Image (cartoon, helix red, strand yellow):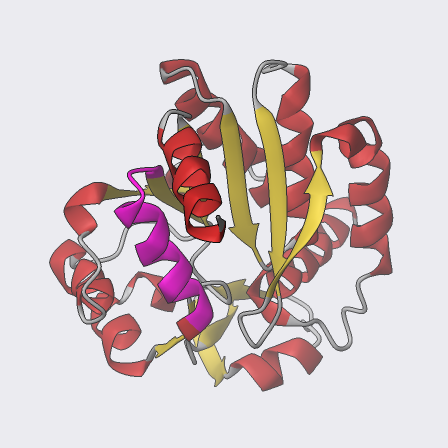
Amino acid sequence: MKNFKEFFSNIQEALVKILVVFDIDDTLVHTPTKINVLKNGRKIRELNSHEFTHYKLGAGEEFDFSNFRKAKDFFDNHKPIVPMIRQLKTDIKRGNKVVMVTARADFDDKETFLNTFRLYNIDMNKVHVYRAGNMKDGPKTTIEEKKKKIISELLQKDNYQKAIMYDDSKPNLQYFVSLKKDFPNTKFYGWHVNERGEASEHLREQFFDLVEKWSEKYKKSIDCNNPRGFSQRASCQSREKKKREKS
């Protein structure tokens, strides 16, 4: 009986069009990418992720994330988050529409970047990578907003009954689930991924009306003296930049 129920459940799922979205940094892989500190356009030092979380920008300084374009560094130094790599492969095998949506811009070598995932027998011909870092929506547009726009455009292209997102950033998930307003016939599921790659269901569509309040509350609660993960560090960097622009 159990096998029959599982078989019937798989048949039902196969008849449903599902979009599955994976973040990359701190969701599929960890990387030790260095951030440059610039002053008057010149690099004055490099920071690892730990140093970056505690670094306070001085007068005339800014962060430079250009190292995030180096595909060879990504390939050589990444550490796979095994549970999420398995989940990615499972969704491909099930025939779901699988995409990666990253805050990064283009890498300097596309094939080297893709080969990182091919190491784990992931068929990258079946996974398209969308890069929010390429979008020209102005400096005040947040990563959450950019990712939401990318996913919205994907949902417009097909009639998906379900949309699932895996991300280490709760604001990204909250913006994702808020798409229910624009796509009422799609069920949305946001899964939060911790540092060990454990995914827990964070948001469902019934919470979409609280997204904007929760997102702002979460961003304000981030301790920029000790941010956790790439997304929190990027949020703090954006906050610091806005402060400099106002001063």
**Which image quadrant is residue 54 in?**
bottom right
Spot occupied by residue 29 in the image (x, y as percentages of width and height):
41, 70
* Res 132 seen here: no
**In percent of the image, x 52 and y 40: which residue is there?**
164
**In percent of the image, x 69 and y 69: which residue is there?**
59
155 above or below 143? above
Between 153 and 103, the one lying in front of the other is: 153
Seen as rendered, the residue at the extreme front is: 1
177 above or below 38? above
Give the left or right position of residue 146, taking residue 115 as reference.
right
**In percent of the image, x 48 and y 80: which residue is there?**
44
**Which image quadrant is residue 183 in?**
top right
**Which image quadrant is residue 13 in?**
top left
* Res 9 seen here: yes
Between 16 and 31, the one lying in front of the other is: 16
Let me know if residue 93 is in the magenta part: yes
The majority secondary structure of the magenta stretch comes to helix
Spot occupied by residue 25 in the image (x, y as percentages of width and height):
46, 63
Query: Magenta segment, which residues?
Result: 83-97
Between 159 and 152, the one lying in front of the other is: 159
Let me know if residue 115 is in the magenta part: no
Spot occupied by residue 70 in the image (x, y as percentages of width and height):
27, 67
Between 245 and 136, the one lying in front of the other is: 136
Spot occupied by residue 120 in the image (x, y as percentages of width and height):
23, 69
